Amino acid sequence: MRAKNVNPSYYLDAFNCPRCGVLAPQEWFPIYKSSENGLTLTRQKSIGGPRVYSQVNSIGKLDWDLTLSICNHCSKYTVWENQLMIYPFETKLPDPHEDLFGDVKGIYEEAALVYKHSPRAAAALLRLGIETMIPQLEEYNIKKGKINNMIGELVKKDIPEHIQKGLDLIRIYGNEGIHPGEIDLNDNHETVEYLFELINYMTEELITKKRKLNEFYSKLPSGKLKGVVNRDKSKVEVKE
């Protein structure tokens, strides 16, 4: 029988830990601010149990409520602010494509980390990811430069129109993140979420599919490959 999955919830006795994934009991530790001792950690297992306010009352009501829950299985903590889980931060954003270049993958992951707090900043980082990716596309031999010019060079090399549109979408929305204009990306989460999908799609089209095709093509017998070369050579000679 499959174990029940319990989503993390504030002051729930047990749930699937967002750190280790195991359904396990959780212990709760509210944090209070003290004018004398800084932060005080007070153990409290139940939301209905006693809460220590003596230190807080001396400085008045605070506008934040910070709590840690600690998993009894892995002993790692989850951070809750005003009853909302803020660490680890979970989103529905797709994982970076496995064929993303290492430096571009790092930029993608950074964009995912800041997305919750600033979709605008995330869009700007994804633009940087594309700007970093294009000069590394070996078969296209594009020199590093302004992103708009690099996309233009790819168009001259006959990339499909849908690839051009995808690259320009990331470029234009990324520019809006750097220089706010007609679009408020902080209120446009759906668009920025799509940009994460789009950079993975660009990777699939520009890197993965080409690599797989070349791998299989190179396995053709040498005689067959030579025949293809001679065929294409004869076409060039006819045109001349």
Image (tube, helix red, strand yellow):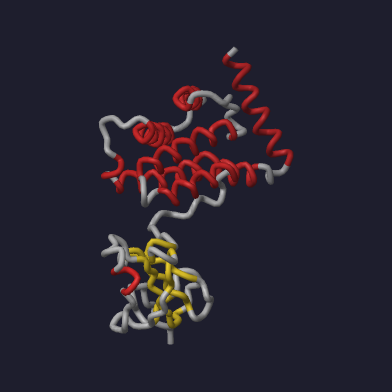
Q: Give whichever of 38, 1 is nearer the camera.
A: 38
Q: Which quarter of the rendered picture does the N terminus lie within?
A: bottom left
Residue 53 visible in the shown view: yes
Specify whether residue 209 is in view: no
Q: Give me the residue at 54% from left, 42% from top.
A: 104
Residue 206 rendering spot, x and y as whole percentages: 52, 39
- Say which residue appears at 74% left-offset and 40% top-offset: 222
Q: Nearer the viewer, residue 174 or 83?
A: 83
Quarter of the image that includes the C terminus: top right
Q: Give the farthest residue toward the top.
A: 240
- Residue at 28 percent of width and 83 percent of height: 48
Residue 97 as seen in the image, left or right of residue 35: right
Residue at 28%, 60% in the rendered image? 63
Q: Is residue 95 left or right of residue 67?
A: right
From this view, report whether residue 89 is shown above or below residue 40: above
Q: Is residue 78 above or below residue 168?
A: below
